[in-house]
Amino acid sequence: MTRSIHILFPLTCCILWVLSSFAPRASGAESAAAARFHKDIQPILVQYCYDCHGDGMKKGKVAFDELKSETDILQKTDLWLAVLKNLRAGLMPPEKKPRPSPAEKQRIANWIKTDAFRIDPKNPDPGRVTIRRLNRVEYRNTIRDLMGFDYKVEDELPPDDTGYGFDNIGDVLSVSPMLLEKYMQGAETIVAGAVPKVWRVVKERNVPGSDFHRAKGEGKANLLTFYKEAVSEHTVKVDQAGDYHVILELEVAGEFDFDPGRCRVVFTIDDQEQTRQEFGWYNNKKFRFEFDRKWAAGPHRLVLELNPLTPLDKKVNTLDLRLAAVRVQGPLEQKYWVRPKNFDLFFWKDVPPGATARHQYTRQVLERFVRKAWRQPVEAERVDRLAAIAENGARQPGKDFADGVAQAMVAVLASPRFLFRVEQTQPPAAQAHPYVDDYALASRLSYFLWSSMPDEDLFRLAGRNELRANLDAQVKRMLADKRAAALVENFTGQWLQARDVDGIDINARVVLARDAGEEKELERRRREFQAQFTNQVAKANPAQTNNPAQTNRLAQGKRRQFSKPPFELDGPLRKAMRQETEMVFACVLREDRSLLELLDSDYTFLNEKLARHYGMTNVIGPDMRRVILPKDNPRGGVLSQGSLLVVTSNPTRTSPVKRGLFILDNILGTPTPPPPPDIPLLEDSEKEFKNREPVLREVLEAHRNKPLCSSCHSRMDPLGLALENFNALGMWREKERNQPIDAAGKLITGEPFHDIRDLKRILVNDRRQDFYRCLTEKLLTYALGRGLEYYDVEAVDQIVDRLEREHGRSSALLLGIIESAPFQKRRNVATMGSVEKPAS
């Protein structure tokens, strides 16, 4: 017992000493920061904030007079971040309360950043970096650029989780055992499809259906309806005479519901019929036909002719024949054979004779490949191990050099160094905030702008340690590259939710009936029509009574034709809406225009279908193009674009709440807190109007009068109601339920507006900095792959200041992010100890 005490006593003392060394102690700097709070900040809070947050008041569970100790004052980073945001946005103090002067606001902001957040503007903390797995888009694009292979990630990999509004956030890109298995299987599939196994093949030319043109009929040459005659043709030119093999690929593109349509298809080559086939309904079934031809050098005419066999009045659903492609192989004589596809991606010469030369070539092939795949130089030992895998695989029965190299490549693609973005830093390693090396910077740059791996230009500059010195030129080059479409599509698709427009269900017939005040009449007629048609089918076709599913399908088809609305939110219209948003954003980026044009501009991008949807008749044709808007037109800027208006609507009506919340979250950067539990539905408030059908403004006013609802709705509703002239389809309207629409309102910060035009002017002028800050935070989050923290405030402020100096030009935002400390550096946890202060 005594011996145990002698052992435990010094151990206990040691533990107590260690624990005491980690106990919070007020340093001299902390004491000075607390002293400055009491001297400079607390009097301002007493004057302007204690009515709600002091002297016994604790609105929002915040009471500044409860901050007694230095720990309370300096470690509540969440509180001070909220104070900073509300102060800058003008949300606090409330509109009717006395407010601090600009100088007092700046004094508070400076204390928060310098003392509460301990930010050093000359050496800001770049923040934490969670090692990032490639998300599905990045994986697909990287495989495309590395392997020349289009891997259908949507079919093969599970969807990525999202965080902070984006699907490239390192913290949520987890890896499950199932996903690891998918990556292994994917690596094998990709290598098998991409890496050539022979050195010479028959030359093949692929003519996509989109290259054909209509010789007869209207519409796309590669999409022919079963119910109209059409002729599509294309001329292919060959350089050598010889034997050729022609492959025709067709697809019957029918909807899930049956359609009785039939058609005859004739395919001719040089006016000689090759096949004559009849087709009926299929739900997306592919067909393939092959022909051998002896051709002379020169042009050869390919013609596809469709003849309907079913009258148009029998049509129930959309039923099309899609011309996928025509592939021409030849000449088939071996002397004309060529290098296979992707040969130059992996090899550059035939396999040399001799074991030594063969081994050296194996190493060279794999070293070049793995450097690109892992996006950084590779140690010689790793290359040797991969070469050993390749050589062992090549010695297996029935295998050769290419099979062995392919086996090693599978190991490369399934490795963590390919699937994750592994980063190294520049020396010296003892720095608290070292720069990432040029290879890591190249990856950060390419995955930000391209959602893909670096190209040879970036690799070359990284190898010379010259990338930082050439950032401006590289950013311009990369934005001009077609791969920059990934930034436009992925960022706007998530920031502005444009990618969601394809999946939103909007009932056009009900929406338009609501505008006209005919909802109840439409519902009555719909039920009456369904009952009558079902009875007629049963009487005319007694056999159908034993097939309810068939009867229901026919009734649905007829019902779609009943009272067909003048506008429907079909696939081409949704695509045009999404393209409008993407093309406006791309225009601002590539032409280095002011970011404020995203809020208000005198132009947009339209085709004929979308223009007519917007009530404009001066745009002809299916191609999207820039259109100058008439003076005082309500369009122009993302708030009036169809994509945003649709995704912020409900299936049968607009949603001022969704629209207002969207503006607060994505334009002003001041989202409301989540709603409390058991909030009554908005539709419940409509029941209070017993003698008539109210407009949404009236329903919202009744809903807002409830104590649980008023605080948030007073911020959301005015913004959402400003967009009420746009219905759930994104169409302009003057009335709802046949009553005039009142779009006027006032922001919670006090600015009144009459309609969407006034609101856009307020956002561009009075709330410009709020938009700059919100967009900077969104794009910086997307670029870094992590959520922003309190220590990122200085980086955001510096970018916003740059935007102000450079009149909002998009280059100021992009270069500001790329040149910022969070993008250029990483935190060295080994030298910093516990960096992040606990947030209360």
Image (tube, rainbow, N blue to C red):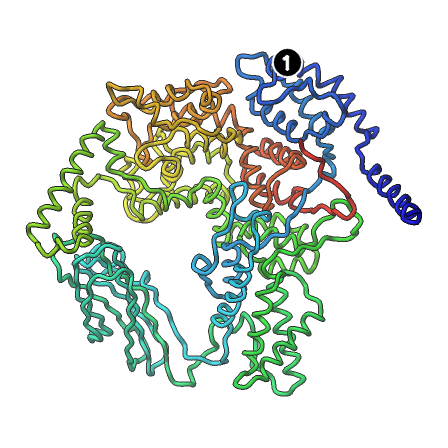
Q: Relative to residue 322, is residue 81 depicted above or below?
A: above
Residue 351 percent across, percent down from the top left: 58, 82
Image quadrant in which you'd find residue 328? bottom left
Q: Quadrant of the C terminus?
A: top right
Query: Count the marks: how many?
Result: 1
- Vertically, is 278 above or below 219? below
Of all residues shown, which one is farthest toward the bottom? 354
Residue at 18% in and 44% down: 559
Q: Position of residue 378 (x, y in %)?
A: 68, 66
Task: Report whether residue 150 is seen.
Answer: yes
Residue lying farthest to the left in this orientation: 540
Is there any visible trace of residue 632 in the rendered image?
A: no
Left or right: 48 in relation to 559:
right
Instruction: Using the image as rendered, state which of residue 793 and residue 19 is in the foreground.
Output: 19
Displayed quadrant of residue 208? bottom left
Q: Position of residue 584 (x, y in %)?
A: 43, 41
Q: Give me the residue at 74% from left, 32% from top.
A: 118
Label 1: state its secondary structure. loop
What residue sits 48% from the left and 58% below the top? Answer: 157
Q: Read off the residue under disc 1.
A: 56
Give the residue type at disc 1.
Answer: Gly
Residue lying at the far front of the rendered structure: 1
Q: Residue at x 31, y 73 (%)?
A: 247
Mark 1, other Cα within 10 Å: few <14 / some 14–19 / many ≥20: few
Q: Which x, y percent locates residue 207?
A: 34, 67
Q: Nearer the viewer, residue 312 or 556?
A: 556
